[in-house]
Image: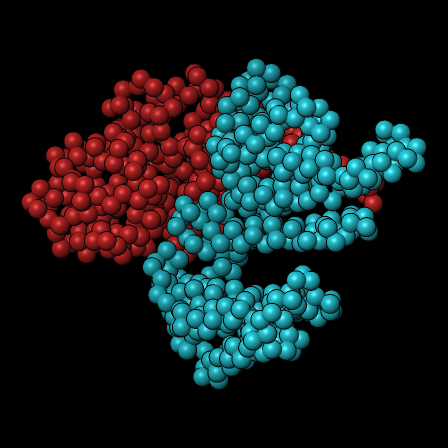
Amino acid sequence: MPAEPNVSHAKPRCSCVALLGTALGVLSLALPWLTLRTSRLAAGEGVLLWDVAGPAVVAVVALGWFAALVSSFDANTQRRALTLGVCGTLLAPLTLLIAGSGSTSLLSSAEEFARSSLGPGIWVGLIATYVLLHTARQSLGAQPFLRNVFTWAPLATIVAIGMTGAYNDLSLAREFSGNESRFAQEALTHIALSLGSVAIGACIAVPLGIAATRSRRAERPIFIIASAIETIPSLALFGLIIAPLSALSYAYPALREAGIRGVGITPALIALVLYSLLPIVHNTYVGLKEVSPAAMDAGRGMGMSRAQLARRVEFPLAAPLIAEGVRTASVQSIGNTAVAALIGAGGLGHFIFQGLGQAAPDLILLGALPVIALALLVDIIMRAAIAALTPRGMHTEATT
Amino acid sequence: MRTRVISLVVSVMVLASSMLGCSGGGGPDPIVVGSKIDTEGALLAHTIMLLLDDAGIEVEDRSSFGPTQIVRKALISGEIDLYPEYTGNGAFFFEGTDPEVWKDAEQGYEEVARLDLDTNNIVWLQPAPANNTWAIAVPRALASSESLSTLDDLADYVNGGGEFKIACSEEFVTSPMALPAFQQAYGFELTDSQLLVLSGGNTAQTEQAAAQGTDGVNAAMAYGTDGSLSALDLVVLSDPRGAQPVYQPAPIVRGEVFESYPEIADILAPAFESLTLETLQTLNARIAFEGQDAGDVALDYLTQQGFL
């Protein structure tokens, strides 16, 4: 992050990233904003911004992107960041508000089962506003308050507008209300499966990582096996575990009684635990190897025993990297858990596969969007936790 | 800090292992109802659960459990107690049976019920009189202009050089039970240019293609009870020569569970007898086409028909 002001000093004329975002934003105006279908399964027909919004609203959106365009060329970094941030904060909720109210007006004159989905214009527009906000936040490194405003204000506004029911006529919202009873249950299953498996995985992987640093004999096999697992496609791994697990549960009825069967939660959990091993083993290994010999020497000089060295020097110094491995494993696990719905373990993949089966794109999104949001959320939370876990002297290194 | 991290890890593990653990303890176990991960599976599972619940039997919802092999494995291993299965699938579950048996509704049902009881102690209950088999559907406009109503009509039309292109899955083309069976029974042969193979294609996609005329397609691989057929204005060509096995959906239940609850046969039978091809098409359409909740559609139907 300290690099950013230097870059803008070298090229004071404009911000290339902001310009790219603005270009996307202008492009979004020309793309269809909504897709109208005569039914949930029918082919869509693109609807442009000026077909769903009045001239005043179109003018406001265009003005917003024009302001962003102009400020992309602003040499004053501070003022540019502020303008871009304000533009993004206003344009993101406005875009979705237009999508919601546009859908309401489109559906009022359409057939009974017509659907209105978010079109390419909205998606590109939202990505563009994200780029603006991101650029603004990057340039505001020294002002945490403004950074937070530009992170949470657009999100809060979008949610607040949603609370009023403004998006209820979007097809995605219809899918949600058609699956409401199941949504919370599948989301919770998804979270429990993905994070539970990483927790179990960490309990196995950290000792393995330690073993790999301590013993040359153990190092190779541990890495070969952990890497080999990672190369197996997720659906294949789920499938591979089912057969031996079923055989086991038939051979030992006690296992079956305990709920360990060839399908359902157990094989899913095993597969996800296996996937979480490599990132954590790898980071534990690197973290311990990277501990500076000087720090170890200092510890020894203070008369620390082997165990004291490990507890008070090695592990505190390696902890941020190990936690980094857990973060990677968690984000990866949240994605992989989507496949678990195919082997009876549930999770948000349920909606993705139902949607694929019915060829209903918005039902697929109902599963996919929360998976993405969950991965981002876990990523943000764990980054913050890692920053807190990092010893003060290491902060510069860990925040790169 | 560290103790907090450890306690977090421990609590997550406890949570995960409690999910693993059996749900036993206290009172009779509920009947665990599963289904395949498709529209009709969800509809039938909810129909079954509502009826059992109404009769005072506790149920656990595991509907949309997974694809056929997974649900079947779950039933055999006792992960679930009951799910709706199709009679014609007996041909795949049991090798070396006479293929002709599966083309007759009654014989097929008796055969699969007998084999599954002997081999896996699974009881087949009353099936619905609806045949959800592989079929060929064409847009209503084409059907009326060329007066197509059976596959015999279609064979005449294709052999007479009529324009024809069907959207289908790879399996439909290669599985001897599907297109090859139709071609042999009705005496026509489709060229490669008359096939639009959607890899991994399902009937929702093929029917959309036929309804929209994508890439010159004017026919679709379909299943008899697909909800989108009526909604997309496609008609199923009938199969008077019986080229296809009959796939009637029936609740199937583990023998041990059936022994504790023999009354479920009588609870479910009347409702399943009422589910004809047209009824299932309409109910499936309300889920797949209108986007309603499967449970709501089932509740609505059962209430209207007086089963609840």
| Left or right position of B174 against A20 | left
From what the image shows, is residue A341 above or below residue A214? below
- Answer yes or no: is residue B200 visible: yes
Q: Position of residue A332 (x, y in %)?
A: 58, 43
Can you tell which quarter of the image residue B85 is in? top left
Q: Which chain is cyan?
A: A
From what the image shows, is residue A393 above or below residue B44? below
Q: Which chain is red?
A: B
| Left or right position of B282 against A69 | left
Q: Residue at x 45, y 46 (%)?
A: A354
Q: Residue at x 71, y 53 (%)?
A: A399
| Left or right position of B240 against A346 | left
Q: Quadrant of the N terminus of chain A?
A: bottom right
Q: Position of residue B230 (x, y in %)?
A: 30, 52
- Closer to us: B23 or A381: A381
- Answer yes or no: is residue A148 visible: no
